[in-house]
Amino acid sequence: MKTTLLKQAALTTGTALLLTAMMGGAHAETTGYDQLTFQAEVKEEVQNDEVRASLYKKAQATDSKTLASTLNTTINNAMRIAKRYPSVTVSTGQQSTYPRYDKNDKIIGWTGQANIDLKSTDFAATSQLIADLQETLVMDNLTFGVSDTKKEALEQKLMTDASRAFQQQAKNLTRAWDARGYRVVNVNLNTGSNYPRPMYSAMAMKAESADAVPRQNFESGNSTISVTANGTIELTK
């Protein structure tokens, strides 16, 4: 996400900074002299609160109709199981079907794969659902991150912090260059995220039954959310 702010300020010694922020791509009129470009970054580490997973069924058949029937039956059954867990968002994922050939380029069968995707902030329910589905499906991937709601709230806070950090740096540079004041030519606010790969245990302490797939104990790890304010100021002397 990139937000462009136009900030025009007139600052003289002993007076307060007047800041006007406007959305858009406009820029302050500049002389082209005594301009400084720099950036200020703020970041915060936050615990991941969302888990995403993808599972799939892969099958082979001598004809495409039989293959489609196998895949559809398996996925439909998985979707019925998923309805037991209303706190988990489940959607059908990628699907593919392709022929298999012999050495004479004659079709001798078909191979196909169908996926379902899971997303939730309820780790316990998601873990149990994955365990239930793994009796017929194979795990494709499992990732953790920050939910949109939590991320947006934190980014709003960090944008304010980054703006203040940029202004403070502007004041410091003004003094360093023996200027009387400064005005902001332009400022861009850029957000970023770093999602380190989390660790999770392979099995729970015990399964509900001897034949059941054991539930995984998730350790979601942390992510770093950052906002950078970069722009240009013009010194007034």
Image: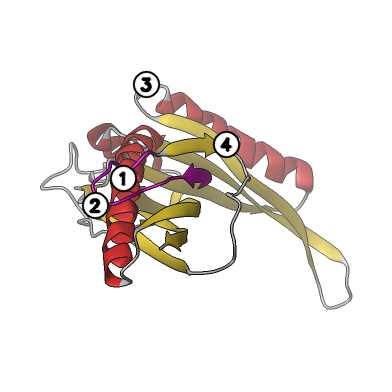
Give amino acid for label 4: Thr
Check the image and report above or below for 199 versus 23: below
Q: Quadrant of residue 20?
A: top left
| Label 3 to label 1: alpha-carbon separation | 33 Å
Q: Are marks 2 and 4 in contact (CB under 8 Å)?
A: no
Q: Nearer the viewer, mark 2 or mark 4?
A: 2
Q: Are marks 4 and 3 in contact (CB under 8 Å)?
A: no
Q: Which residue is mark 3?
A: 86
Q: Is residue 73 left or right of residue 162?
A: right
Q: Main secondary structure of the magenta part?
A: loop
Sequence-first tag of 1 and 4: 4
| Label 4 to label 3: alpha-carbon separation | 16 Å
Tell me where the magenta segment starts and ends, as one range. 1-18
Residue 66: image location, x then y, percent: 72, 42
Give amino acid for label 3: Pro
| Label 2 to label 1: alpha-carbon separation | 8 Å
Q: Residue furthest bottom?
A: 103
Q: Which residue is mark 2?
A: 44
SS for dot 3:
loop
Q: Which residue is mark 1?
A: 158
In the rendered picture of this protein, how many numbered marks are placed on residues?
Answer: 4
Q: Are marks 1 and 4 in contact (CB under 8 Å)?
A: no
